[in-house]
Image (cartoon, coloured by chain):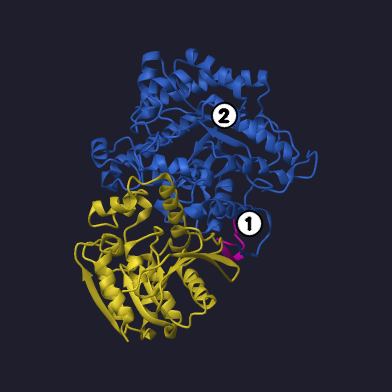
Amino acid sequence: MAMAGAWAEHTVDVSGAKIFLRRAGKGTPVIVLHHDIGTLDKLAFYDELAKSHDVIIPDYPGWGRSPRLEWMRHPRDVAVFMQGLKAELGLAQAALVGLGFGGWIAAEMAAMAPREVSKLVLVGAFGMKPAEGDILDQAIISYIDYPHAFFHDRKAFEAHYGNVSVDQLEAWDIAREMSFRIAWKPYMYSQQLPHLLGAVKAPALIVWGDDDRVVPVSAAHRFKTALPNGRLEIVKGAGHAVEMEKPVELARLVSPFIAAK
Amino acid sequence: MHLMYFTEQPMSAYDEKAGLDYGATALTFSNKHFDPKEGSRLYNEYIEQYLLVEEVGIDGIMLNEHHNAPFCMQAKTNVFASILAAITKKVKIVILGNPLPLAENPIRLAEELAMIDMISKGRLVSGFVRGGGQEQLSAGVNPAFNRERFIEAHDLVVKAWTQPGPFRWEGTHYQHRVVNPWAVPLQKPYPRVWIPGVISKETIIWSAQQRYPYIALNTSIEQTKKIWELYDATAADCGYTSGPENRGYLARIHVAETEEKAIENARQFTWMQGEFTGLAHPVWANPAGYFSPSGRRDFVQFAVGRSQNPRGDMSFEQQMASGMIMAGTPKTVLPRIRHLLEETRPGILSVWAQDGKVSHEDSKTCIRLLGEEVFPQVREWAKELDLKSPFEADAPVSIKYSKDLKKKAVAAE
């Protein structure tokens, strides 16, 4: 099996904005769309994917190392920028792996340019109003309690974030502020998205942790209903951040799915 | 000097044990613990107290607004302002303040305030605030745009008051196609605007740039002096000399017939478990995007319990010792007020006279003593120290109406 190789860091100019990204691996281009809390630089799941595919992980404008765009008001604006990034990178098509909030971005990208998506993977995706329950409101819980809620097992949180540095707390606050700026209400879902996904003919893999306390699993069923070619997989013993808690299991689902013709 | 009376209108009959058990007494503390029979009783007692305030000759009544919490029953400041407009004759009705960013439709606020001004025959002081974090969350408005919404809503309201309609407003946060309210204020150019706040630099600077009096809310004497230093420096940059007519102060002062009674009642100033807006999670009071980015690193550590409240939690005894709470008979309280006046030189003084479970009778006694024994002496001192209110100084309503600017006003940053 090919090695992941070193992760390269790039900054790409998209429509006057600077998008920071990390990239590794060869093969099918895969764009990973990160959580609303941002992403750690290094994750086992990313390394696994990069063994078989060309994995691109951008920071959205305002998250991580991509400068904020003051005028942004909706995740669709981010999706448009990610489409622009794809164009700048010269990619006619890419597989999209959307993690949580990134799932909403991925779904928007697919809806706006269905032929440019080779495969769509939605993991604990935001963007749909759950038929039962609500998406967890981060506004009333703390900077640590919200990421805590991403995990089924607290030990998995600690393995990733340790004692939580002040830098990390600060990054979470900035991420939260960006989330408020662009997804305040309706909170973390679109009333239009269910009606826009009918044109997404690409195979879609919807993955949910069986203990996702951030997005109720009823949202997964709504995605499956809306997507013409969707399949739902539940991962046991995983919370919202399936990629952090069960990286090997998730990679075993996602990598072959992307590779399949 | 302009002397005012203030009460939070505490919901003193709520179930305190339930609040302690729940762990919060704000935002999400269930309103099943709000008994409207008690609410009805309390509102009518507060009305009686306000009528007494006018009777004993106090200049103004200060109102405010908070949501989702027992510490304050004023869910809509314009409601009480409307009541006072009709049932009082002389007091200034001082709203400190309408939380502008909570308004999805600032024109509606402009209309209500114009009605209040007309019905009261020109007694409205229309203060504005950003609103606390909890207010944003309770109203569902975006805290990340709080400051922008505050400024744009202010500009829109002032334009609605001063420019004949119809006009159209295509703003960033507000868009209106036909601004043409058939309710305009009686006072010209528009009702005075006073801006209450604590230590937020941006708000102090903005107020000075508008030439709006800033009302320091119960800050320590040292903090208050720093506020005036910043205000005065900004005023100088804008071409005017600021003075007592630009300065207000809210003091917690309870007076009673005896020292013991006064101190016993004054303890109620810490009735909300020491946090005057109730026990709340720090991220409720300061949702992301609400406060200055420069404070972010300190705040996030405090919000997860790693450091002390940057405001500092002072005990009742410490607050008494530092003068942030004053309690006693008129005779023992007056020297402390004198000290405050000498040190910070405000032209507007608001007395937050009681809180929590202080009885209706004791509240009325306090009002009577303030009006009859404390304030007359304070007025004499104010004359001696030349502490004029904006009314006495005939100060311009805003910088735009100044006649005394020394150089071109510097554009706001």
User: Which span is picked out in magenta?
Assistant: B172-183
- Spot the yellow chain and give its letter: A
The front one of A165 and A2 is: A2
The front one of B372 and B289 is: B289
Question: Which label sits on residue B160?
Answer: 1
The amino acid type of the residue labelled 1 equals: Ala
Q: Sequence-wise, which precedes: disc 2 or disc 1?
A: 1
Q: Is residue A74 above or below residue B142?
A: below
Q: Is residue B288 above or below residue B402?
A: below
SS assignment at label 2: helix
The amino acid type of the residue labelled 2 equals: Thr
Label 2 belongs to which residue? B224
Examine the structure image and report whether residue B44 is included in the region drawn in magenta.
Answer: no
Q: Which class describes the residues within 10 Å of circle 1: few (<14), some (14-19), or many (20+)?
A: many
Residue A256 at x, y = what percent?
A: 29, 78
Q: Which class describes the residues within 10 Å of circle 2: few (<14), some (14-19), or many (20+)?
A: many
Q: Quadrant of residue B89?
A: top right
- B171 sits left or right of A131 in the view: right
The front one of B362 and B401 is: B401
- Spot the blue chain and give its letter: B
Q: Is residue A131 visible?
A: no
Q: Are marks 2 and 1 in contact (CB under 8 Å)?
A: no
Q: Quadrant of the N terminus of chain A?
A: bottom left
**In the image, what residue occupies the spot 64% across and 31% down?**
B229
Q: What chain letter is assigned to the residue under label 2? A: B
